[in-house]
Structure formats: C-alpha cells, structure tokens
Amino acid sequence: MLKLDHVVYFTTESPDQTVTAQKQLGYHAVIGGHHLNWGTQNALLYTKNAYVEWLSIEDKNIAQSAHHPLTSLLLHDLKSGDGWGTICISVDDIKKFDSDIKRKGFNSSGIIEGSRKTPEGKIKRWKMLFIDQPDLNQLPYPFFIEWKERENIRFENLKNSKAILAENERLQIRECLFSVNDISQKINLWAKLLSLQVLETNSIRLPNAVLKFLPKSLNGKERLCEVIIK
C-alpha cells in the first residue's frame, strides 16, 4: 500500500533552531539526527498519519560529494532560500515497486540504503528510491521509502522515546498542494506512477492524505507549495 510517509522542508536552520521555533508555535518537534553519509541533519514533527522533516546541511563538503538525489535537490533549492521541497511515500515492498514503475516507463535511482544516527547514538535504517529527474527546476516526483521496522513497532518506539506525544496524535497532514506549470500533464504522470485515479478536483487521494495540483504563479517555481496540517 502507498501512503504518505513525510513531507520535506528545506531549511538553513539547524535542528536545534527548528525545534525551538516550533516549540514557540506550540508544536512538539524533536531533533532527528544526522545522515552521516549525506552531510545532512534534520528535525521532525510527527502527526497521527505522517510527519514533517526539516532538512538542512550539516557538512557541505560531504553533501556536495554524496550524489544523493534528495541532498542534491536540497543544495539546489537552498540557493533561493528556505521552503518546501518534496514528499516521501512509503511502500510495502520497494524492490517490487521499483520493478513495477520501470515497466511503466519510469527510470529510477535503484534502491538506496538509508540511515540516520539519532542524538542517542542509535542508527535508524531504511531503503529508498527516487525517480530520475535531471532538471531540478521541475516539480520533483515523490520519493519512496521502505522502513526496516514494521509501522506499528516504529510508532510505538517513537511514543516510548517521547518523539510522539498525545498532542502530536491530534494533528494530521491532510493535504499537500503542488504549484505546477501544466496541471494535466503533471497530475497524469503522478497518477500513472502511483497507479491512482485523478479526481475532478485536480487531486490524487492516498489512503492518508490528498495531493492537490494548482497553477503556478508567474514568478514561482514548480514545487510543493503548502502543507495543510490540522
């Protein structure tokens, strides 16, 4: 099953700064940790159905030499300032999903092993997959993740570690809004990739969130432009 896993916000702020800022706004965010192989770091805000990731550069030299699709997009987008970057969708079997999308005509990065070192020194592991997109100015396709832990176990571990409190579970990511040049072209490509139907509202419905496509403003860029959380 395909589900929204998380949304990614690119920022120049450190995880400490992000957590402090979110606390002032009344939200319980936590420091995620370090992606040692990619030179990045993050802060996280969990909700009932998915989470927000604030991704920033920790070591620019490592980031520039990592040749990791999300890190490359982060470096590219930060040239014009902080902002929403992309979304991640979870899959049950990433190897099968990779085969399926290749049959549909999409080229992929192949399966990438991912890991993050938490502030407590633990290593979180997952597998991820990106759709090839040489032009970083275009709307990024979602990327895909298969967690090493089963979802219910991962959720319980997050609650036990106080990364998820009762107040987090009262929030949900309802909609992800995308600003694009050609709504029909983009939404049909995404529907093909995800094997989902296009709704009359220029939307695609995942089991836990709605992806909606909007016309791009004159001076804007094709990106995730807003995330509705309530």
Image: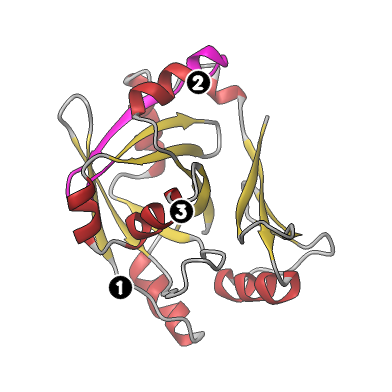
Q: Nearer the viewer, mark 3 or mark 2?
A: 3
Disc 3/disc 2 C-alpha distance (Å)? 22 Å
Q: Are marks 3 and 1 in contact (CB under 8 Å)?
A: no
The amino acid marked with disc number 3 is Asp
Tell me the element at label 2. helix
Q: Which residue is mark 1?
A: 110
Q: CA distance from mark 1 to mark 2?
A: 35 Å
Viewer-nearest residue: 166 or 12: 12
Mark 3 and mark 1 lie on one chain; the one further toward the N terminus is: 3
The residue under label 3 is 77
- Could you classify mark 1 by the number of other residues whose Cα lies within 10 Å: few (under 14), some (14-19), or many (20 or more)? some
Alpha-carbon neighbours of circle 3 within 10 Å: few (<14), some, or many (≥20)? Answer: some
Residue 74 x/y as whole percent: 39, 52
Question: Is 45 rendered above or below residue 191?
Answer: above
**Magenta region:** 22-40
Residue 166 at x, y percent in the picture: 52, 16
Foreground pick, 152 / 3: 3
Between circles 1 and 2, the one closer to the viewer is 2
Number of the label disc, if any, that sits on residue 22: 2
**Residue 68 position by quadrant:** bottom left
Residue drawn 69% across the image and 77% down it: 185
Which residue is at 41% across, 21% downward? Answer: 19
Mark 2: give few (<14), some (14-19) or many (20+) Cα within 10 Å.
some
Q: Amino acid at mark 1?
A: Gly
Indicate which disc, 1 or 2, sits on the residue closer to the N terminus: 2
Residue at (34% x, 22% y) in the render: 16
